[in-house]
Amino acid sequence: MTPLHPLSLPMAGVLAAVGVILTYAEIPVPFVPPFMKIDMSDVPAVIGLFSMGLPAAVFITAVKDIIHLFVSESLGIGEICNFLVSLVYLAAFRCAAPWGRAFGFTAAVLSMTAAAAFLNAAVLLPLYFAAFHIDEAQLLAMARAAGSPAASLSDYILLAVVPFNLVKGAAVAALSSLLWKKLAAYFQ
């Protein structure tokens, strides 16, 4: 086992702080309900994964999501979803990266998207319905108001959740790759 570099914890803390800041830079996405916004707060976790490994990346993600709980309007449901989907993204990248960084990012984006679809259908949407006293019809009305043709929960998953996560995962991959090229020397 390799010893932890003495600067790992402070650097992970700095990356978590950057992640928290990035949670506030949300980008609305067409064709999905207004509560679904893309942010690049997973980029610091990917940088942490590249520089310090999976445990540091998980730490960065956890700290970012725990701190965001204090200003969340999702009663923690959004943060739980973000944490779980981010873990899948990071773990998939870590497992697939030995075959190349592009393969790693492809596996990460596809795994994240599949996990988000499953979690939304099985856990998160029922939690949202109970916590916010809305039902399927109201969610679909929000999606249709945003321009989505979703007529059922299956449609919502396929036409909102899946494309949203594909776009977010690809954006995180692209930005992480670009930043890592500039920052790699500082993490040596």
Image: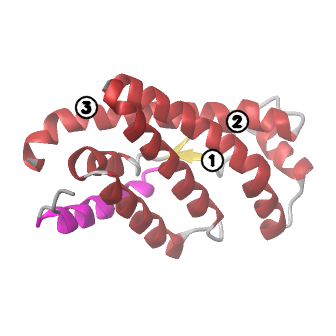
Three-letter code for the amino acid on which mark 1 is drawn:
Met
- Whichever of callouts 2 and 3 sits on the residue coming sooner in the sequence is 2
Q: Main secondary structure of the magenta part?
A: helix
Callouts 1 and 3 close, C-beta under 8 Å: no
Task: Name the residue: 77% across, 40% down.
Answer: 143
Instruction: Assign a secondary structure to mark 2.
Output: helix
- Whichever of callouts 1 and 3 sits on the residue coming sooner in the sequence is 1
Q: Label for residue 178?
A: 3
Callouts 2 and 3 close, C-beta under 8 Å: no
Q: Which one is in front, 182 or 184?
A: 184
Asked if residue 98 is positioned above or below residue 32 in the image, the reply reads: above
Per the image, the residue denoted by label 2 is 160
* Distance Cα–Cα, label 1 vs label 3: 25 Å
Q: Label for residue 36?
A: 1
Three-letter code for the amino acid on which mark 3 is drawn:
Leu
- Whichever of callouts 2 and 1 sits on the residue coming sooner in the sequence is 1
Q: Is residue 75 left or right of residue 58?
A: right
* Mark 3 residue crowding within 10 angstroms, few (<14) / some (14–19) / many (20+): few
Callouts 2 and 1 close, C-beta under 8 Å: yes
Is residue 155 rendered magenta in the image? Answer: no
* Mark 1 residue crowding within 10 angstroms, few (<14) / some (14–19) / many (20+): some
Q: Position of residue 162 (x, y in %)?
A: 66, 33
Instruction: Assign a secondary structure to mark 3.
Output: helix
| Residues in magenta, as a range | 6-26
Task: Name the residue: 40% across, 68% down.
Answer: 63
